[in-house]
C-alpha cells in the first residue's frame, strides 16, 4: 500500500460546480481520501505539490473509432483544416497540391488514406474523381474520406483492391455502397501498416489523449463485412496495454463475432456505427428523415426494417450487452428508440449522434433516459464553414437541434469526437456546447465539462469508478493554470491541461518506437 498525498492544488471534484478540496490522497492508483486539511498522523510514501494549479477529473471521449484514428495517424493525413480564416484548402487545386506533396514522400505502392475532406467548403462542391486521384497520387491506392465519414473518393488501384469494376465508375462512394466496403477498406489500410508505422500511430493517439486531458475512450470497432476482421482482433490485443483506458464496443450484428472477446471486456458492449447504423449522415444525404432534403427533394431510408432492429436489440439486451447505435435523422432515431423501448434489462443503452430527434422522440428520451452521445463541435463547424444543415435540411428540422433541453431533462448527454471523423479535441466539442448551434440551447462551461466526465462515465457504465474526483474512483486528473469553470465560455476552445495523471502518475509522452510498443506489451493486460 503506497499512499501518496497531492497538495497545493485547487482540486475540483466535478460533482458540483463549487465543490473544491485541498488534499488528494491516492493509494495504488485509486483515490482514498479528499481533504480540506492535511490528515494528521498519516505517513505518506510521497507528498507531491501541484504548484498551486487547478485540478480536474480527466475527460472521457465515449465515441471514437480507434483503429481508423490510429490508421490516419499512421498512413494518412488530414485533407482540410479548419482555421479562423476558414477552411484550407477550399478548392481541388489545393487538394491536388496536398496529395501530390504527401504521395511524393511515399513508396510507389503505398496505401494512402486521407480524411476530413470538407465537400461543402470546396469551391467545386465535389470529391476528386478516380482519374484525378490516379494522376495526383502517381497511381497509388488512395481513399479520401469526407469529414462526416459517410462518403469517399477512391483511385483506380483502390477500386481494384476492393474488387470494384473501375469501368464507368467515377470513384465516388456514398450511402450504403460506401458503408458496406468499410471493413474491406480497413483491412486494406491496416495490411499496409508496418510495425514502425503502427508504433507511431499508437504513440500519437495516446499522446493526443493525454495532451487533451482524456483518460478513457469508448472505441467503436469492427466491421461485419470483413470475414475474419483481423484488424479488430489486433486492436483488442494492443488496446489492453495502452496507458489510456479503452472500452470496446463491437460493431457486429452477429453476436457470435463479439462473443469471442467477452472475456476481455470490462462490461459487455456492442454496437456503434458500422453495421449498427440506423442511417447515414446529413452531409451525404443519407440521414433518414420523414421529409425530403431541401436541395435534392430526395429522402433516405433507414438501413434496416423495424422488426429486424427489434430482433437484434432484444437478442443483445437479453445476452447482457449494453447497446450503442448510430441514428441521426428523426426516422432513424425513432427506429432505434422503438426497439430499445422493448428491452427489459434496465441497462443504460446509447444513441450515437441523435441530433435531429422528433418531438415524440424527445419525450421518449426524457422518459427512458438513454444516453445520447453527440458531437456539438461538428454542428459548430457546420454553422460557420460547412452550412450543410441549412443547405440540405428544411428549417423545421434544423430548429429541432437541442442541447440544453436534453441536459436540463437529466438525459445522460455526452460530448465526443467521433475521431477520426473529427479531431480528438474535446475542447472544440465543448465550444460547440457553450456556443451551441441555436444560442438558447447553449450550456455553461461546467455543464459542458459534465458532458465529458460524469455523463460519459455513466454512458460507459463506469460512474462508480471514474468521472469525478471522489474516494473510490480512479486517480485520473489533469492540472491547469486557469479555472475552467470561471472562464469566458468561448475561451474553452483554447483551454489545455498543463499535465495529465493516470492512476496518480504523470503521463510520460511516448516516442513511438517499436521497442517502446513491444515493451508496453509485456505489461499486465487490462480489461477493455
Ligand atoms: Zn462514429
Image (cartoon, helix red, strand yellow):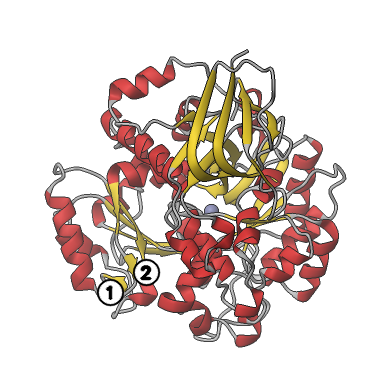
Tell me where residue 383 appears, x and y as whole percent.
48, 77
Q: Residues within 10 Å of mark 1 (few under 14, many from 20)?
A: many
Q: Which residue is mark 1?
A: 90
Q: Residue at x 69, y 17 (%)?
A: 41
| Left or right for 44, reference 377 | right
Question: In front: 476, or 371?
Answer: 476
The answer to whether residue 449 is above or below residue 267 is: below
- Whether residue 258 can be seen here: yes
Tell me where residue 77 appears, x and y as whole percent.
29, 52
Quarter of the image that includes the C terminus: top right
> CB of mark 2 within 8 Å of CB of mark 1?
yes
Question: In front: 478, or 83?
Answer: 478
Question: In front: 115, or 152?
Answer: 115
Q: Residue at x 69, y 69 (%)?
A: 404
Q: Which residue is mark 2?
A: 118
Q: Dot 1 lies on which element? A: loop
Amino acid at each position: 500500500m503506497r499512499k501518496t498525498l497531492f497538495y497545493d492544488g485547487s482540486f475540483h471534484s466535478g460533482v458540483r460546480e463549487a465543490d473544491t478540496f485541498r488534499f488528494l490522497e491516492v493509494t495504488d492508483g485509486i483515490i482514498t481520501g479528499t481533504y480540506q486539511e492535511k490528515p494528521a498522523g498519516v505517513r505518506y510514501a510521497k507528498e507531491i505539490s501541484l504548484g498551486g494549479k487547478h485540478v480536474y477529473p480527466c475527460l472521457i471521449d465515449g465515441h471514437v473509432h480507434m483503429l481508423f484514428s490510429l490508421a490516419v495517424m499512421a498512413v494518412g493525413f488530414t485533407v482540410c483544416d479548419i482555421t479562423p480564416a476558414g477552411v484550407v484548402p477550399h478548392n481541388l487545386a489545393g487538394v491536388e497540391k496536398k496529395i501530390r506533396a504527401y504521395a511524393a514522400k511515399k513508396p510507389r505502392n503505398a496505401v494512402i488514406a486521407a480524411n476530413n475532406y470538407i465537400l461543402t467548403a470546396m469551391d467545386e462542391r465535389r470529391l476528386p474523381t478516380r482519374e484525378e486521384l490516379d494522376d495526383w497520387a502517381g497511381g497509388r491506392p488512395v481513399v479520401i474520406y469526407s469529414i462526416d465519414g459517410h462518403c469517399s473518393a477512391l483511385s483506380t488501384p483502390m477500386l481494384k483492391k476492393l474488387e470494384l469494376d473501375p469501368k464507368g465508375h467515377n470513384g465516388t462512394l456514398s450511402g450504403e455502397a460506401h458503408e458496406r466496403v468499410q471493413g474491406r477498406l480497413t483491412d486494406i489500410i491496416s495490411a499496409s501498416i508496418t510495425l514502425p508505422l503502427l508504433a507511431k500511430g499508437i504513440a500519437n493517439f495516446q499522446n493526443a489523449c493525454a495532451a487533451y486531458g482524456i483518460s478513457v475512450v469508448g472505441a467503436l470497432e469492427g466491421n461485419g463485412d470483413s470475414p475474419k476482421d483481423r484488424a479488430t482482433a489486433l486492436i483488442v490485443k494492443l488496446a489492453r496495454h495502452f496507458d489510456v483506458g479503452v472500452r470496446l464496443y463491437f460493431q457486429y450484428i452477429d453476436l457470435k463475432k463479439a462473443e469471442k472477446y467477452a472475456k476481455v471486456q470490462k462490461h459487455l458492449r456492442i454496437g456503434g456505427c458500422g453495421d449498427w447504423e440506423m442511417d447515414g449522415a446529413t452531409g451525404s444525404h443519407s440521414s433518414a428523415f420523414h421529409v425530403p432534403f431541401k436541395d435534392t427533394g430526395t429522402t433516405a431510408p433507414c438501413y434496416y426494417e423495424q422488426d429486424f432492429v427489434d430482433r437484434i436489440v432484444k437478442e443483445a439486451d437479453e445476452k447482457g450487452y449494453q447497446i450503442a447505435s448510430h441514428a441521426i435523422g428523426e426516422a432513424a432515431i425513432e427506429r432505434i428508440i422503438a426497439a430499445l423501448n422493448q428491452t427489459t434489462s434496465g441497462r443504460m443503452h446509447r444513441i450515437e449522434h441523435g441530433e435531429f430527434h422528433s418531438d415524440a422522440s424527445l419525450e421518449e428520451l426524457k422518459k427512458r433516459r438513454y444516453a445520447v452521445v453527440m458531437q456539438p463541435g461538428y454542428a459548430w463547424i457546420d454553422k460557420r464553414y460547412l452550412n450543410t444543415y441549412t443547405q440540405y435540411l428544411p428549417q423545421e428540422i434544423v430548429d429541432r437541434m437541442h442541447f440544453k433541453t436534453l441536459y436540463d431533462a437529466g438525459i445522460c448527454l455526452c460530448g465526443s469526437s467521433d475521431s477520426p471523423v473529427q479531431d480528438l479535441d474535446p475542447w472544440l466539442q465543448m465550444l460547440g456546447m457553450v456556443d451551441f448551434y441555436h444560442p438558447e440551447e447553449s450550456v455553461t462551461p461546467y455543464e459542458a465539462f459534465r458532458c465529458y466526465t460524469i455523463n460519459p462515465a455513466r454512458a460507459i457504465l463506469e460512474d462508480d469508478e471514474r468521472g469525478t474526483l471522489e474516494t473510490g474512483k480512479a486517480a485520473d486528473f489533469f492540472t491547469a493554470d486557469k479555472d475552467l469553470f470561471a472562464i469566458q465560455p468561448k475561451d474553452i476552445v483554447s483551454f489545455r491541461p498543463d499535465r495529465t495523471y493516470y492512476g496518480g502518475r504523470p503521463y510520460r509522452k511516448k516516442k513511438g518506437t517499436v521497442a517502446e510498443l513491444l515493451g508496453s506489451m509485456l505489461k499486465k493486460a487490462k480489461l477493455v
